[in-house]
Image (cartoon, helix red, strand yellow):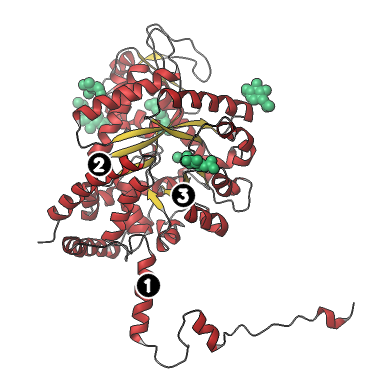
Amino acid sequence: MSASSLKVTIKSTKLSPPMLLVLGIAALSTAMPDPSYRESLIRKERSQQTGGRMVLSEAELQFNALLDKLKQQEMESEDFPPAMHFFQAKDLIEQSQLFSLLQKMPKGGALHVHDFAMVDVDWLVKNVTYRPHCYVCFTDTSSVRFTFSLRQPKSSPPCSQWMLLDNLRAKVGNTTDFDQSLMRNLTLYSDNPEVAYPNQDVVWKRFEEAFLAVWGLVTHAPVFKDYFYEGLKQFNADNVMYLELRALLPPTYELDGTVNSRFWTMKAYQDELKDFLGKHQDFFGCRVIVTAHRGINATELTNALEDAIELQKDFPELMAGFDLVGREDSGRPLWYFSKALSLPAERGVSMPYFFHAGETDFQGTEVDQNMLDALLLNTSRIGHGFALVHHPTAKALSRQMGVAVEVCPISNQVLKLVSDLRNHPAAVLMSEGHPLVVSSDDPALFGACGLSYDFYEAFVGIAGLKADVGTLKEFAINSIKYSSLSPEQKNKALAIWQKKWERFVLENLPQ
Ligand SMILES: *[C@@H]1O[C@H](CO)[C@@H](O)[C@H](O)[C@H]1NC(C)=O
Ligand SMILES: *[C@@H]1O[C@H](CO)[C@@H](O)[C@H](O)[C@H]1NC(C)=O
Ligand SMILES: *[C@@H]1O[C@H](CO)[C@@H](O)[C@H](O)[C@H]1NC(C)=O
Ligand SMILES: *[C@@H]1O[C@H](CO)[C@@H](O)[C@H](O)[C@H]1NC(C)=O
Ligand SMILES: *[C@@H]1O[C@H](CO)[C@@H](O)[C@H](O)[C@H]1NC(C)=O
Ligand SMILES: [Zn+2]
């Protein structure tokens, strides 16, 4: 090989003036830049961000002045909450005026919430564990399990000894500390999260323990119903008018040991929702996304989908679609399931998918491919999409298809994908107005509740100083626009939201 064939020539990358004109960029020079030109570029960039093209009323502009002032206050404080771990920031957030405002704000829908993490654990301990026939056991891993039973439950791993909680509490006397320790078991809360959770494996292990601790309580049939009702109450109280719930539909058990079917579970959701709607006229509703754990194999998924198809026939209004849950990094990639997931289409059944995808920071792994595969499998939304900005093709496709990303800031932080929320990749998505919604994933496990804490983190930490009333408005409108509701229902929900919003703005104009 001759030396000359190896020679690499670098062409000038400087753009010629005609080229600059083609790109719409004025000729660059070292002279003082034109301030009005600068202004127009700034305006252009602002119009690209989430909410940047919202048309605002006079009242909204006035309200925005207040919002702006409160946000400045947050940014000037020495401890900027979004830069801190949520466990340490929570008290500060609760003291913030902006947070109180966000609590009052009509936020539309919460589209990414899981069935057994929607109610704060205080209620579980103070209400549910005080019900009769509740047994507890302490495991070797310093966790707990619960079960309701008429008789002494049989011991089986990890429970060698079940104790009736009534008896145990009588022995303890002052139950304040004991109840606190039970609550700690049901959340991931720690005074010192950086030390308690040095890496993702440790925090996910604890996540799964907490989930198992909750399990025996919430799968008891009467508790299951009350839990869901209480969850609706808490979201409604946080000014969320609509929910889409990822639900595992586990078998529930009665006191005598009878086990109920998944049909029972869906019926329970339907009945409780109807009851709730009867008593809360302003609440719009709830739909269920049936989920299976991604640890299963393709045969099991095929069975789960057959089940889902049946449930969809029985509960067409309640059921929104299907998803796979569990830690992506340790589960199977979506592509492994691609054949099984084509089953509904092969049968001519429309089964909307709402895949968790891209809840990872391991770039280039098989699991990191999940977002593109979710889109190829015609997903309706992407759960988390934390890694989406690493994939320009998938990102463009998601935008083109109108597939919104469900951003869950606190979840991503607690599960150690990001520490300072200003560095959350959704900041990029928000700066370019990518379709997205804000949600709370598993608020109870993180010691939060409802949706406002995540709204705070998204608005103050991720979206940044220039995000304004338009941004908040678009978050809320998106939560209806990208929901699974029919076009008619969306219009109805939007009209209800609009009224609430206008009232909210008028009630919060600066003095
Ligand atoms: C527990 O919750 C149920 C239903 O949600 C309610 O009827 C009951 O009064 C509560 N009990 C206590 C002790 O708070
Ligand atoms: C129970 O213990 C807690 C904390 O240890 C204490 O604050 C509380 O006063 C005690 N309650 C009673 C009734 O003694
Ligand atoms: C769970 O509760 C038990 C019993 O009170 C307690 O000993 C244990 O430390 C708790 N575990 C956690 C992780 O808080
Ligand atoms: C899938 O899992 C089921 C239940 O665990 C098992 O019986 C079956 O053999 C597995 N199938 C394959 C193909 O691995
Ligand atoms: C994609 O999903 C939507 C919503 O579920 C459905 O209406 C549409 O028919 C699906 N398209 C294909 C090609 O499967
Ligand atoms: Zn989730």
Q: Residues within 10 Å of mark 3 (few under 14, many from 20)?
A: many
Seen in the image, is 155 located left or right of residue 192?
right
Type of the residue with mark 2:
Asp
Left or right position of 52 against 400: left
- Circles 3 and 1 in contact, beta carbons < 8 Å: no
Q: Which residue does the numbered mark 1 point to in the structure image?
A: 44
The residue labelled by disc 2 is: 238
Q: Is residue 505 above or below residue 175?
A: below
Q: CA distance from mark 3 to mark 2?
A: 26 Å
Q: Secondary structure at mark 1?
A: helix
**Residue 236 image offset from top left, x and y in percent:** 25, 37
Which-is-in-front pick, marks 1 and 2? 1
Q: CA distance from mark 1 to mark 2?
A: 34 Å
Please tell me which residue is depicted at 35% across the width and 21% down the height of the picture. 268
Earlier along the polypeptide chain: callout 3 or callout 1? 1
Against 441, residue 224 (above or below) is above
Q: Locate the C terminus and report the quarter of the image it occupies.
A: bottom left
The residue at the point 17 percent across, 51 percent down is 504
Chain-order first, disc 1 or disc 2: 1
**Percent position of residue 457, x then y:** 34, 53
Q: Are marks 3 and 2 in contact (CB under 8 Å)?
A: no
Assign a secondary structure to mark 2. loop
Using residue 507 as the reference point, say whether residue 25 is left or right of it.
right
In the displayed orientation, state which residue is furthest to the bottom: 31
Q: Which mark is residue 403?
A: 3
The type of residue carrying mark 1 is Lys
* Quadrant of image for the N terminus: bottom right
Nearest the camera: 121 or 265? 265
Please tell me whether mark 3 sits on a helix, a strand or a loop: loop
Task: Give how far across and how far down residue 215 sits, in percent.
Answer: 43, 24
